[in-house]
Amino acid sequence: MAYVVHFGTKVLRKKVPVFSCLFELKLISHIIFSGVKSVRRTFDFGRTYVVRPKGSHKATVVWLHGLGDNGSSWSQLLETLPLQNIKWICPTAPTQPISAFGGFPSTAWFDVKDFSEDAPDDLEALDAAAAHVANLLSTEPADIRVGVGGFSMGAAAALYFGTCFTSGKYANGQPYPANLSAVVGLSGWLPCSKSLSNKLEGVDGAARRAMSLPILLCHGKGDDVVPYKFGEKSSRVLGSTGFQDVTFKAYNGLGHYTIPEEMDEVCAWITSKLGLEG
């Protein structure tokens, strides 16, 4: 299975594993809400691909791929964008068993136990992914603005990373070490949405960070893998928990892929929010 993404005169054909689409078709029959008991696991992250800025380095964005994908394919796509001053870091998720697939292994930022609305979040894996992103950003210069974004499951992980920044800690209670200037989620959803309000309540500085963190969510109304209503609901939950700078963009007829119109929106938004004008 493949889809084609056009950027000007360039065309990128990106192959998507069949099992990836089948999994995510079931996966997004729910939004994952509750906690999960901690089980000690090892997360071996794959190769990280870096796209160097073509101009002066003003911002760094970590981009997280979807289920069954890798950092290479997105690095190729992001390199075509007209954002001369951004360094893109595209890590590859660990290959791990997916419980809902009977243990079938896939590159994934986290596991899913089942497909009910009350299925537990894989907080250990989400924390590991968030810590990996923070580590990738840890060596960036202090004057560089940083962001995180992703597609599908990668968008979910990116949004979780944003909530860790806002609360100042991971789900395991360890302090969150990085600063964050922007979050982008394409065709994704918000993990732990039911517990987000409690996660932020009473945390010193959380309300201020939530109020000032820019978030862009884009979703196609024709998405039959991650239904549009889940992206819309994620936007509502963020708004109701104090995130005041949330932009939600809907695209008629867009399925579970990206198009030039959407990426143009991403480029314009990132340029504005990361101060890259001129």
Image: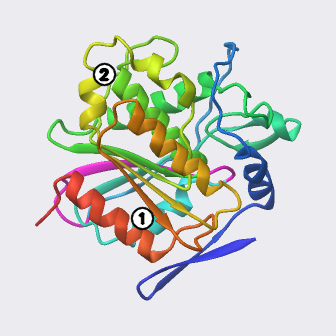
Disc 2 target residue:
206
In the rendered image, is residue 49 in sight?
yes
Above-or-below relation of 92 to 80: above
Residue 4 on the magenta span: no
In the rendered image, is residue 47 in sight?
no
Q: CA distance from mark 2 to mark 1?
A: 31 Å
As drawn, which residue projects farthest toward the right?
A: 102
| Picture disc at residue 78 | 1
The reply to whether discs 2 and 1 touch (Cβ–Cβ < 8 Å) is no
Magenta span: 54-68
- Residue at (65% x, 74% y) in the render: 3
Which of label 2 and label 1 is nearer to you?
2
| Picture disc at residue 179 | none
Count the numbered circles shown.
2
Q: Helix, strand or loop at disc 2?
A: helix
Q: Helix, strand or loop at disc 1?
A: helix
